[in-house]
Amino acid sequence: MTRTFTRLIMAGILLAGAQAVQADDLFQWQSYSLTYLNGQNFKVNPPNQQTVTFEYADSWKYGDNFLFVDNIFYNGKPDSNVGGNTLYGEYSPRLSLAKMTGHDFAFGPIKDVLLAGTYEFGEGDVESWLIGPGFDLKIPGFDYFQLNFYDRHARGSRAGNNIWQITPVWSYTIPVGNSDILIDGYIDWVVQNDSNAQGDYHRNIHVNPQVKYDLGKALHMTPQKLYVGFEYDYWKNKYGIESTSDFDTNQNTASLLVKVFW
């Protein structure tokens, strides 16, 4: 792991920690969590993986932020590029036009219009910058539903033409007995090929929901703090690598999940 990447990880964690001590009128809410995943049948990388994920999210005076960092462990077989484990993360800030201007941008199902960005970072050739319009939508039954449109700028050997990515993000709660099932996740849909990138970068779609049972609430503990369930992971043309009969890059798997919030 490079020093630069280490600094990025630490900066993200320190940023999240620093925000926690800010004035109450600056932040509406903040959330921290750790997730443990254990799954098999992954493509491109070694098939057996365990992942520990740190996540931070907030809603603040002028928008919202989301940060995650994955520490991925390859069980039994190291990855040919990064070894026995690797780190990958994304930081996704958004600026709300309604919050910044004081004007109401609601129209039909649209609750707010935002400027959305994402920075993808990690070991190996993964760095990308994304920017574009975002929308908060009001859809009956959903806790929240975001729809972000990004102009995607890859770095390194994958750099080429700018291509578009569409990313919906959602959360939906279903009451079950004396507890709840939470279904949340995202879809990253890269809608174009880029033949100018080294080795070509193909359109791809990554569907990544989590289905979680609120075990803490069921055990009469504090609700929304301890979840168990699974994460489903479907990725067609993973990493933009076109799937062929000789090299299958279409990932379709699930991982057991334990998630703790504080």
Image (tube, rainbow, N blue to C red):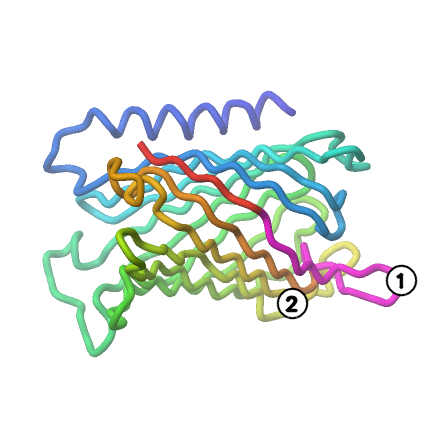
Instruction: Work out whether 212 lies above or below 123.
Output: below
Q: Position of residue 67 (x, y in %)?
A: 41, 40
Q: Residue placed at 17% from the left, 44% from the top?
A: 61
Nearest to the observer: residue 36 or residue 70: 36
Q: Position of residue 237 (x, y in %)?
A: 70, 63
Left or right side of 55 for 202: right
Query: Helix, strand, or loop for circle 2?
Result: loop
Q: Which residue is mark 2?
A: 203
Left or right side of 133 for 38: right
Q: Residue placed at 43% from the left, 34% from the top?
A: 34
Q: Which quadrant of the structure image shows residue 261?
A: top left
User: Tag count in the figure?
Assistant: 2
Q: Which residue is mark 1?
A: 246
Q: Is residue 21 magenta?
A: no
Pointer 1 or 2: first along the chain: 2
Highlighted range, magenta: 238-255
Nearest to the observer: residue 56 or residue 142: 142
Instruction: Work out whether 17 lies above or below 169.
Output: above
Amino acid beneath label 1:
Asp
